[in-house]
Image: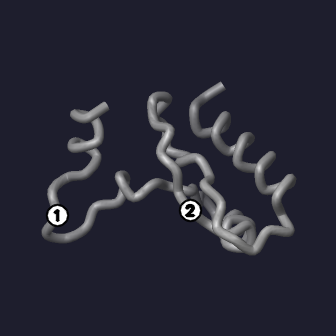
């Protein structure tokens, strides 16, 4: 099973168990890296709503590029 599918299944289990929570939950980053265990904080409502968007994944900040900032993916890989 690929890393994305494993992490999505774990996140879905957490969503199912904590669905009534209104507080943000640390969902696993759903990137394709098998060595990434970063968290992304979302409420259950936000996670569930975003699941309706085609090809959406819960991604940790380390995977998002921001203008004017160094390549955080490379920075993460070097520190791992």
Question: Residue 53, how many percent across, how many down?
Answer: 65, 68
How many discs appear?
A: 2
Residue 25: quarter of image: bottom right
Q: Which mark is residue 57?
A: none
Label 1, label 2: how far apart the Cα atoms are: 22 Å
* Label 2 sits on residue: 41
Question: Measuring 49% from the left and 29% from the top, which residue is drawn there?
Answer: 34
- Where residue 66 sits, quadrant-wise, is bottom left
Q: Residue at x 31, y 31 (%)?
A: 80
Residue 30 position, x and y percent, is 56, 46
Q: Residue at x 82, y 58 (%)?
A: 18
Depicted 60 relative to depicted 53: above or below: above
Secondary element at tag 2 = strand
**How many residues crowd around disc 2 within 10 Å: few (fewer than 14), some, or many (20 or more)?**
some
On-image quarter of the N terminus: top right
Nearest the viewer among 4 and 28 is 28
Would residue 45 appear left or right of 17 to someone viewing this image?
A: left
> Is tag 1's residue or tag 2's residue first in the polypeptide sequence?
2
x%, y% of residue 38? 47, 45
Q: Is residue 75 above or below residue 63?
A: above
SS under mark 1: loop
Between tags 1 and 2, which lies in front?
Answer: 2
Q: Which residue is mark 1?
A: 69
């Amino acid at each position: 099973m690929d890393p994305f599918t494993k992490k999505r299944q774990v996140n879905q289990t957490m969503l199912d168990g904590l669905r009534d929570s209104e507080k943000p939950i640390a969902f696993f980053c759903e990137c394709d890296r098998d060595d990434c265990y970063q968290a992304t904080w979302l409420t259950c409502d936000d996670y569930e709503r975003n699941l309706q968007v085609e090809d959406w994944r819960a991604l940790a900040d380390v995977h998002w590029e921001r203008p004017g900032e160094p390549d955080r993916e490379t920075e993460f890989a070097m520190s791992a």
